[in-house]
Image: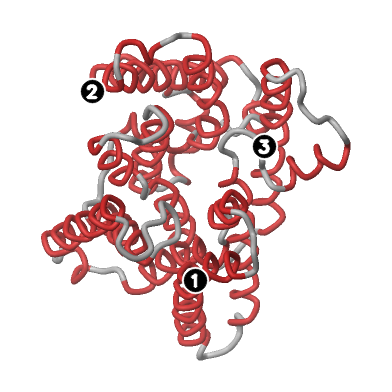
Amino acid sequence: MTLAASAQADVVHTRADARATSRDAVIDTMRGVAILMVIGIHSLPQPLDLAWTKALDAALRPCVPIFLFASGYLTARTRRVPLFKRLKAAVIPYAIAFVAAYLYMTLHNPAMDHRITTTVARFALAYVFVYYYVFVYIGCTIVMWLIYAAGGSDRRDTDQRMTILLALAIGFGLVAGSYIDPLLFHLGFAESFVEEVRMRDIPFWFSFMAVGALTASFAGAALRNMRAILVGAMLIAYLLYLAVRLSGIGDAAVYDSTAFFLYAALFSLALLVLQPSAAWLASLGSGSYFIYLWHIFIVMLLRDHAGLRQFGPAVSFAVTFGLTAMVSIVALGAVRHFSSARVARWLGA
């Protein structure tokens, strides 16, 4: 809280005030929570050998689902998918960050493969740092656009069609999450390849966007009156997901397991019905893409050059998280304050 209070003045800027009326403070606050969770995950010492690191990693994993849930929720409220605008807003900042990440990787790996085909593959698969989410979001956005196209806009039964299509998408996503890895292993693919595929399992990730869209259609006073039940269910789902992760029973994958879906979907839903609204978190949420793209440089610099491991995993995590969050927040405020609106958009701010 001290960190947030001290950085709030840097983050809140005049352009944000001008845009405030067109943004949803609750959704932006949810995104602010999610981006801090992202920083938390990337700040954890690797590998996750200790029980407390696995427990914390599991607790923070709903971060990406929150972003997808929020996108689906807002899409259902506006009932449209401005596909080109969303793709442009995602690809341009990613391309700039990719160049910077590529240079960083080159400086730290003199033997890096610079062939054009390899570089194009790295860009297309977001195979630098932790940028896989960019194309997860793009893929999910395209799927949502296709579903809205199939649902139609001039029929009386459009809402019913959309509900059925979204429900089918959730079911298909859970099936894909359950069987894609056994299929790939059966076909003889290496574990590292299977892991990369599971991180980019679009049908599974889209299920969170579909849950968000369905929530927008059915959310109301009845759902808000179930806050205690939803929070309790979310906590139980977390314990189930953590038990699966720790014990290795069934599908103990970090990403696209059924246990993870249950926990992350309930976390997103519970967070929404709690109606969080904090100005400083909303400011972070509105610039969460910038923080997502650039915070990892701070994490990597600390991991590669600070020698924090010698102080133990707890201190390493605390210092990495604190410095990364602080520098990211200050950088976001600086970009918004000193750059033009166009440059800020290009950087994801």
| Residue 163 drawn at (x, y percent) | 45, 81
Q: CA distance from mark 3 to mark 2?
A: 30 Å
Left or right of 53 in this view: 197: right
Quadrant in the picture for the C terminus: top right
Quadrant in the picture for the N terminus: top left
The residue at which mark 1 appears reads as 173
Find numbered disc 3 in the image and state the secondary structure of the residue it sits on: helix
Left or right of 272 in this view: 120: right
Q: Is residue 284 visible?
A: no
Left or right of 96 in this view: 26: left
The residue at which mark 2 appears reads as 1
| Residue 184 drawn at (x, y percent) | 60, 66
Which mark is on residue 262?
A: none
| Residue 73 drawn at (x, y percent) | 43, 61
Q: CA distance from mark 1 to mark 2?
A: 37 Å
Tell me which residue sits at (61%, 46%) in the image.
Answer: 134
Q: Amino acid at mark 2?
A: Met
The residue at which mark 3 appears reads as 94
347 shown above or below 65: above
